Image: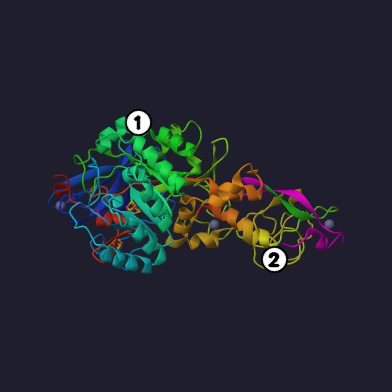
């Protein structure tokens, strides 16, 4: 996994920080720590999250 | 939609007496939907298939009716013929005709000769070559074979995804060493007959009290990490008032017990008398009664009709047992599309077909949430909809919305995917059990861990018999019995004619 501090916000030019972030996914709410821009609040979602854990959540929820 | 006579659907069935293929209709009258058919020789037959406790058309989830000329040889063309619509999800192998109980109802064939180890190995070779299905060791009572652990090990070695034992639990209760040997051989889970929470039910259905033995069998399986799923045969007036009690007991035994699989009684093989209308306990009755008896733990919206098999064959709901013993539902409601968009499914399919999917190569600016913020790096954008493809990100005002469309996944739903999903939940997962203690279920990792350690599945299958057989259902069956060198859909293999059946 990429370290949050290695990522910069394209627009604000500042380093991202790991922040507890809430997801709403198929009607379920989860939180996990994600790199976020301290200025504009955008969140970076890396591939490990989407292809790894989120697709596992998807499989659990989608039930097929 | 129905015509003047109340006919809502046409299909094909068999005559319960001579088993010849005859046309049939589903007709709504007297508060139920009946399967009705006329044999030129043996007359008219009518049996309830739905009692309108739930909306039948929603339940069908858009599955198409049997059309004129389709599956012309069904059900007499089995082995799996080229017209069959589903692969082998589970393959059932009878390893012995012997049994240590004499139940009122039993589908098994007690006249076959005892197969030897060589024959069973050859059968397993054949089954494993049919795409790594789950192997169900069945009987008779399979645990009467002392060499069962060898068969389990052989099936795993030949590549069966999961090995399941269908058992009444008696030997598992009295012989812990045997349980240990099965676990050692790689047995994944046991489907254990479990008809009720008091001995009156066992006395009636199985001829003697059995509850203590059932619970000891669970203890032994627990000690050796073999997942147990309770399988009640549901008979109106015998245990239909205990559905909620069975569920509560099963949940209290999580993670050792992985779920309950209800089987409304059907009239195959051995049964006391030909069924009267009231003997039919339909799926919609079962599900509504179960929910009503659950004390608010589960809701109708937590369940879906079968989608690997035909919707009228069963239902399932996935849950997680939380630390306080409550059930967190995972299965999405029936009315919404499988992809998680709230578009209703199109009539001809159970998925919106991707119409709600985000565009593949969307722009780099303008976040998907429509806020005008810049999307990140190589991300896709969903054009203002809160639905996304992979690698998409959204700021959504600090709350991240990730709703990947699963349309592609669903349309590829095969017997294999269904089996992987189901099998994983029926298995124990010791590593997850160790990690799950005290974890926060609302965190992503806590959820994923507990979904593995304390998965709980509530499901049902309404086996068909000569009275209610519907070729539209049968042609989509994924549970196949291996016999005489071939695989056959379960309800075709065990189909028994009325008169020959109960002598
Ligand atoms: S049940 Fe399936 S395999 Fe058997 S005849 Fe019908 S379509 Fe063919
Ligand atoms: S075994 Fe019978 S009830 Fe089950 S899916 Fe096959 S046809 Fe349907
Ligand atoms: Zn920024
Ligand atoms: Zn006939
Ligand atoms: Zn869809």
Left or right, B467 with reference to B345 = left
Q: Mark 2 packing: few (<14 Cα in 10 Å), some, or many (20+)? A: some
Q: Is residue B51 highlighted in magenta?
A: no
Residue B94 at x, y = what percent? Answer: 28, 56
Residue B250 at x, y = what percent? Answer: 44, 38
Left or right, A27 with reference to B484 = right
Query: Which residue has dot 2 on it?
Result: B362
Determine the residue located farthest toward the right in the rendered image.
Answer: A13
Q: Is residue A16 highlighted in magenta?
A: yes
Determine if marks 2 and 1 fall on one subunit: yes
Q: Is residue B366 visible to us here?
A: yes
Q: Mark 1 packing: few (<14 Cα in 10 Å), some, or many (20+)? A: some
Given residues A22 and B147, the one toward you in this image is B147
Left or right, B147 with reference to B298 = left
Quarter that holds the C terminus of chain B: top left
Chain bearing tag 2 is B
Residue B475 at x, y = what percent? Answer: 33, 59
Given residues B59 and B276, the one toward you in this image is B276
Indicate whether B124 appears above or below B96: below
Mark 2 lies on a secondary structure that is loop
Query: Which residue has dot 1 on it?
Result: B198
Mark 1 lies on a secondary structure that is loop
Chain bearing tag 1 is B
Given residues B262 and B380, the one toward you in this image is B262
Residue B264 at x, y = what percent? Answer: 33, 42
The residue segment tinted magenta is: A1-30
Chain-order first, disc 2 or disc 1: 1
Q: Residue at x 28, y 57 (%)?
A: B95
Given residues B436 and B8, the one toward you in this image is B436
Mark 2 CB within 8 Å of ligand 5: no
Q: Is residue A26 visible to us here?
A: no
Picture quadrant of residue B201: top left
């Amino acid at each position: 996994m990429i370290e949050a501090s290695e990522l910069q916000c394209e627009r604000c030019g500042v380093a991202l920080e790991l922040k507890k972030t809430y997801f709403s996914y198929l009607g379920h709410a989860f939180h996990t720590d994600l790199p976020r821009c301290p200025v504009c609040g955008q969140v970076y979602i890396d591939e490990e999250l989407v292809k790894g854990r989120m697709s596992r959540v998807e499989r659990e929820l989608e039930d097929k | 939609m129905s015509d003047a006579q109340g006919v809502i659907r046409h299909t094909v069935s068999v005559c319960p007496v001579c088993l010849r293929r005859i046309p049939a209709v589903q007709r709504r009258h007297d508060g139920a939907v009946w399967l009705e058919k006329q044999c030129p020789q043996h007359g008219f037959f009518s049996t309830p298939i739905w009692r309108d406790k739930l909306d039948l058309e929603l339940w069908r989830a858009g599955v198409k009716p049997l059309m004129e000329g389709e599956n012309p040889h069904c059900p007499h063309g089995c082995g799996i013929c080229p017209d069959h619509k589903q692969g082998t999800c589970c393959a059932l192998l009878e390893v012995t005709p012997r049994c240590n109980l004499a139940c009122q109802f039993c589908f098994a064939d007690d006249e076959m000769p005892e197969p030897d180890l060589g024959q069973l190995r050859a059968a397993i070779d054949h089954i494993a070559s049919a795409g790594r299905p789950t192997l169900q060791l069945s009987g008779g009572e399979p645990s009467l074979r002392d060499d069962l652990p060898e068969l389990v090990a052989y099936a795993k070695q030949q590549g069966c995804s999961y090995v399941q034992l269908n058992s009444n639990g008696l030997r598992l209760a009295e012989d812990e060493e045997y349980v240990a040997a099965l676990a050692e051989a790689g047995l994944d889970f046991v489907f254990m007959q479990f008809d009720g929470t008091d001995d009156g039910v066992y006395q009636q259905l199985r001829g003697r009290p059995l509850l203590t033995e059932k619970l000891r069998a669970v203890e032994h399986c627990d000690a050796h990490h073999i997942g147990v799923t309770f399988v009640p045969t549901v008979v109106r007036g015998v245990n239909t008032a205990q559905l909620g009690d069975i569920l509560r007991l099963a949940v209290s035994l999580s993670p050792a017990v992985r779920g309950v699989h209800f089987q409304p009684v059907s009239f195959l093989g051995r049964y006391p008398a030909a069924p009267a209308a009231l003997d039919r306990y339909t799926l919609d009755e079962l599900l509504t009664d179960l929910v009503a008896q659950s004390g608010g733990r589960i809701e109708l919206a937590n369940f879906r009709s079968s989608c690997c098999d035909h919707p009228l064959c069963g239902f399932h709901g996935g849950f997680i047992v939380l630390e306080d013993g409550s059930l967190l539902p995972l299965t999405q409601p029936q009315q919404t599309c499988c992809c998680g968009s709230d578009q209703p499914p199109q009539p001809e399919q159970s998925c919106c077909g991707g119409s709600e999917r985000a565009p593949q190569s969307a722009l780099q600016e303008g976040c998907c949430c429509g806020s005008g913020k810049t999307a990140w790096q190589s991300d896709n954008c969903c054009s203002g909809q809160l639905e996304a493809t992979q690698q998409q990100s959204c700021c959504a005002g600090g709350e991240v919305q990730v709703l990947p469309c699963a349309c592609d996944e669903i349309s590829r739903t095969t017997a294999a995917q269904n089996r992987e999903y189901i099998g994983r939940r029926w298995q124990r997962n010791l590593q997850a059990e160790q990690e799950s203690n005290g974890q926060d279920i609302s965190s992503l990792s806590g959820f994923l861990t507990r979904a593995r350690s304390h998965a709980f599945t509530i499901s049902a299958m309404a086996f068909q018999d000569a009275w209610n057989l519907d070729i539209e259902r049968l042609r989509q069956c994924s549970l196949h019995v291996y016999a005489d060198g071939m695989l056959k859909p379960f309800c075709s293999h065990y189909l028994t004619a009325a008169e020959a059946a109960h002598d």
